[in-house]
Image (spheres, helix red, strand yellow):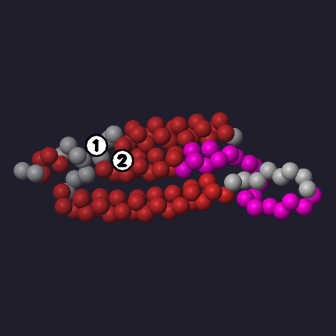
Amino acid sequence: MEVILAILVGILFTAGVYLLLRRSIVKFIIGFIFISNATNLLVFMASGLLAGAPAFIRDEGGEKIIMADPVPQALVLTAIVIGLGITAFTLALKYRFFQVTGTDDLDQLKRTDQ
């Protein structure tokens, strides 16, 4: 499971960096979303994956119980909310930018200055 998620994180980072280097603002925003999701998965994987283990459980038999750490889960949840807010803000900026300039290509933006 960890190997599959590690490959997925690598693919998301690669696609995100590729899209960030494109000339279109829409592709830039999609690349930002990919990198944000890849970072969230990386933090979640770094905390350790425990299948079926809840964050809080009772110790009834005196035996050692493996628990999932709730701090990375809370950090990832907070990062998801912040990433959603930043994405909504950049989409609103892109909409206004397109209304003013009439293009979303950064190469054509040089011609709008004249």
- As drawn, 66 above or below 13: below
- As drawn, 98 above or below 111: below
- As drawn, 19 above or below 97: above
Please state which amino acid type lies under the numbered disc 2: Lys
Residue 27 part of the magenta segment: no
Query: The residue tagged with tag 1: helix, strand or loop?
Result: loop
Q: Nearer the viewer, residue 55 or 63?
A: 63
Q: Which mark is residue 61?
A: none
How far is disc 2 from disc 1 in space, using C-alphas? 8 Å
Q: Nearer the viewer, residue 93 or 103?
A: 93
| Residue on which disc 1 sits | 23
- The mark total stands at 2
Badge 2: residue crowd in 10 Å (few <14, some 14–19, many ≥20): some
- Provide residue 76's location: percent of width, then percent of height: 57, 55
Badge 1: residue crowd in 10 Å (few <14, some 14–19, many ≥20): some
Q: Is residue 59 left or right of residue 71?
A: right
Q: Residue at x 23, y 46 (%)?
A: 106
Q: Residue at x 83, y 62 (%)?
A: 58
- The stretch of residues the image draws in magenta is 40-61
- Provide residue 25's location: percent of width, then percent of height: 30, 50
Residue 49 part of the magenta segment: yes
Residue, far front: 62
Q: Which mark is residue 27?
A: 2
Q: Quadrant of residue 8?
A: top right
Residue, far right: 61
Give the position of the N terminus as an image quadrant: top right
Whether label 2 touches label 1, CB < 8 Å: yes
Q: Residue at x 12, y 51 (%)?
A: 112
Please state which amino acid type lies under the numbered disc 1: Arg
Q: Main secondary structure of the magenta part?
A: loop
Q: Is residue 81 left or right of residue 88?
A: right
Q: Is residue 44 left or right of residue 103?
A: right
